[in-house]
Image (tube, rainbow, N blue to C red):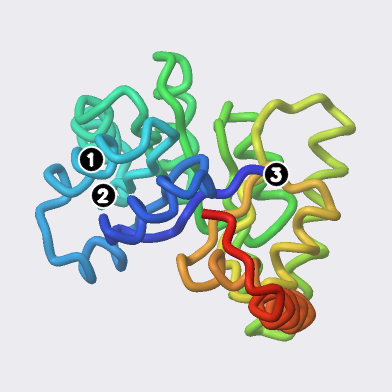
């Protein structure tokens, strides 16, 4: 499974990229607001840090505006992915961008039927929001499972990008169910390395090595 980091924080992206832990980046208007920088400048710098897919989201909710903004975003760098809302206008724009050879990420997916339509429109990625469904006491992972089965039934090439990931368990379950990508906040991604038995084992090894009185260097 590929990992995208869900942030617009350049320092976080650089750290995870240098560690070889991420394959791309996703952003959204809320993350751009938090970064407090002009979007084109921000996305350009992110694309200089990573050559993986970088999702930049349109602000318009109407087709003509999406087309205009999507083309501007795509001109920033060759690895930009145009992020579009899962609406009829968004799907229409998705079809046009796909026909022009541009990559798209259809976001705010909450049902298998929506995901089916996005695949029909040629989306590069579909972003089902797992955590927000869990917030409503709906099993978000059931949606991942349903989309995986539908896409496999018909050979759709759209990649399932599990989004709104909140916990390490979300990552594990998404991987088990066959999600192609998980987009994860930096703190959650870093937490995947943690395990108390690893910490305890390392502590014991360090103590025993000190007792040998040796130095490798």
Q: Taking 11 as reference, is 115 above or below it?
A: above
Question: What x and y, as percent, mark residue 162?
Answer: 64, 55
Quarter of the image for residue 143 reads: bottom right
Residue corresponding to mark 2: 60
Mark pair 3, 2: CA separation: 31 Å
Residue drawn 59% across and 44% down? 126
Q: Which mark is residue 186?
A: none
Q: Earlier in the sequence, mark 1 or mark 2?
A: 2
Q: Earlier in the sequence, mark 1 or mark 3?
A: 3
Q: Count neighbours of disc 3 (C-alpha within 10 A) and say few if under 14, some if 14 to 19, many if 20 or more.
A: some
Residue corresponding to mark 1: 65
Residue drawn 71% across and 69% down? 170
Question: What x and y, as percent, mark residue 185?
Answer: 48, 66
Label 3, secondary structure: give it.
loop
Q: Taking 100 as reference, is 212 above or below it?
A: below
Q: Nearer the viewer, mark 3 or mark 2?
A: 3
Depth check: give the residue in front, 88 or 190: 190
Q: Nearer the viewer, mark 1 or mark 3?
A: 3
Q: Is residue 154 left or right of residue 20?
A: right
Q: Is residue 125 left or right of residue 71?
A: right
Residue corresponding to mark 3: 1
Question: What x and y, as percent, mark residue 147?
Answer: 78, 48
Residues marked 3 and 2 touching at CB (< 8 Å) = no
């Amino acid at each position: 499974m590929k990992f995208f980091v869900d942030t617009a924080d350049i320092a976080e992206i650089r750290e995870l990229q240098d560690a070889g832990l991420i394959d791309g980046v996703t952003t959204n208007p809320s993350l751009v607001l938090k970064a407090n920088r002009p979007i084109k400048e921000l996305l350009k710098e992110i694309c200089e840090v990573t050559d993986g897919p970088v999702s930049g989201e349109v602000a318009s909710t109407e087709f003509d505006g999406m087309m205009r903004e999507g083309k501007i975003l795509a001109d920033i760098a060759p690895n930009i992915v145009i992020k579009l809302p899962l609406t009829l206008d968004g799907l229409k724009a998705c079809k046009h961008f796909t026909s022009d050879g541009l990559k798209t990420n259809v976001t705010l997916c909450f049902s298998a039927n929506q995901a089916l339509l996005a695949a029909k429109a040629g989306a590069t990625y579909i972003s089902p929001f797992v955590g927000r469904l869990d917030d409503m006491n709906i099993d978000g992972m059931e949606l991942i499972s349903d989309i995986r089965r539908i896409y496999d039934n018909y050979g759709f090439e759209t990649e399932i990008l599990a989004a709104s990931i909140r916990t390490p368990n979300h990552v594990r379950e998404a991987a088990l169910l066959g999600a192609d990508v998980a987009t994860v906040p930096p703190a959650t991604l870093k937490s995947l390395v943690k395990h108390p038995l690893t910490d305890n084992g390392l502590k014991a090894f360090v103590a025993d090595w000190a007792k040998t009185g040796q130095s490798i260097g």
